[in-house]
Image (spheres, rainbow, N blue to C red):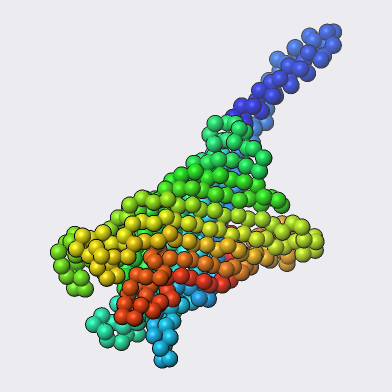
Amino acid sequence: MLYRNRTITAAMLSVAALLAVAPTDLAKAADVATVPVKANPAPDVPFFLVNDNRLTYSYQFTATDPGAYSIQPDGSINGKTAKQVYSFTHFDVWAYGTNFFNVDMLKSTHNDPASPCQPTGTLPFGVTGSCAGATEFYAIERSTFGWNEIFNTQAFKIGPLRNISFEVGVDLGTANSYYAPTTNNVVGGLQFAFDLPYKGYFNVAPLVVAGLASHKSFLQCGLFNPGTPDVTCLLDGNRRFPPTWKVETNYYMDLGFLPESIRYFAISGRVSVTGTKGDMNTLPALSGVGRFSNASKIELNSEPIRLTFDAGKAFIGPKYSHFVDLWVAYRYWQNKYGLDSNAAPGTCTVAATGASTNSCTEKSASAGVSVKF
């Protein structure tokens, strides 16, 4: 479309220039017009208008993993675990929308042990174990298709509203902990994009989430859960939650009101709210029995504030803005994975006493460094 408009404009300008020639010079102009002229080809428009790739190392000081806790000598319960996080992030803008992809590898400390240790740090049958911290992989992908671009209009740009888009994506996750959890979700819905001051943005996306499969080892038929398939256990430990709703928001804004000499800072954040999925276990023989009977709760996963320092711009120059970023953030995650942080005996609470394991709500500061390449 852009190339066609440029071609039409060039043709109109050529006609206008010809008509501006004096009548006595038309013959000369005609002769000149017959001489073949080699036109310079129009420059190719790149497929990706923005193509940003980053590697990040970060540290979460007091993260959690549901059910992973230890009893301290004084009787208190420690449900926290520090996590090292290694991330790859890709973001691009093309003619009809955007693509975002992020994959994290999270490495926990011993308080969140890898299999075969159980979450409490013991081996099966209660023998004390010594296992390395669990390793988790989690990936998220989101793609948008803008209505302004699809319909070749500016009708969806009103005031601070910049665009409305279709949005689709997937969530994938797995960990080598005793529960052997997996996440396989697809999402779809809309995104509303708004402008903020200083070239910032705020996006809000109401979505539908469909879980393709969710694995838990304690649901799997076998040594640790003998019984009748599809009655008291699942053959492969995989189950599917019914579709539910989800709202994702994120924002970014440079602190452009700061004096030019210290204009190296930006704030950003995100909030994701996921609806209930029904009972955390749907096996008929286990409905209403112990820890398997707990209804899921609304899940709040957020990083409400992140402060970023543009080290590339500060120490090398504006040409290298955001090539190296240093940042600190605060994370708050309530009812992780939909588990009721005040119930779920054996996971969020100690089955024997009802005391909280402090593992199903996460409140953690984090810090990291991101490098663009």
- Judging depth in this view, the residue of 305 and 136 nearest the camera is 305
- Judging depth in this view, the residue of 175 and 56 nearest the camera is 175
Residue 118 vertical placement versus 270 (above, below): below
The answer to whether residue 67 is seen in the rendering is no
User: Which quadrant would residue 292 be assigned to in this image?
Assistant: bottom left
User: Which quadrant would residue 160 be assigned to in this image?
Assistant: top right
Residue at the far left in the pictured view: 228
Return the x and y of residue 164 as percentages of the image width and height.
55, 40
- In which quadrant will I find the N terminus? top right
User: Which quadrant would residue 97 be assigned to in this image?
Assistant: top right
Return the x and y of residue 364 as percentages of the image width and height.
53, 72
- Judging depth in this view, the residue of 323 and 258 nearest the camera is 258
The answer to whether residue 195 is seen in the rendering is yes
Residue at the image point whose x is 53% and y is 58% from the top: 271
Q: Is residue 298 left or right of residue 178?
A: right
* Number of numbered callouts drawn: 0
Return the x and y of residue 342 as percentages of the image width and height.
40, 70
Residue 162 vertical placement versus 225 (above, below): above
Q: Is residue 149 left or right of residue 122?
A: right
Residue at the image point whose x is 75% and y is 12% from the top: 30
- In which quadrant will I find the C terminus? bottom right
Residue at the image point whose x is 57% and y is 68% from the top: 330
Return the x and y of residue 193 as percentages of the image width and height.
59, 45
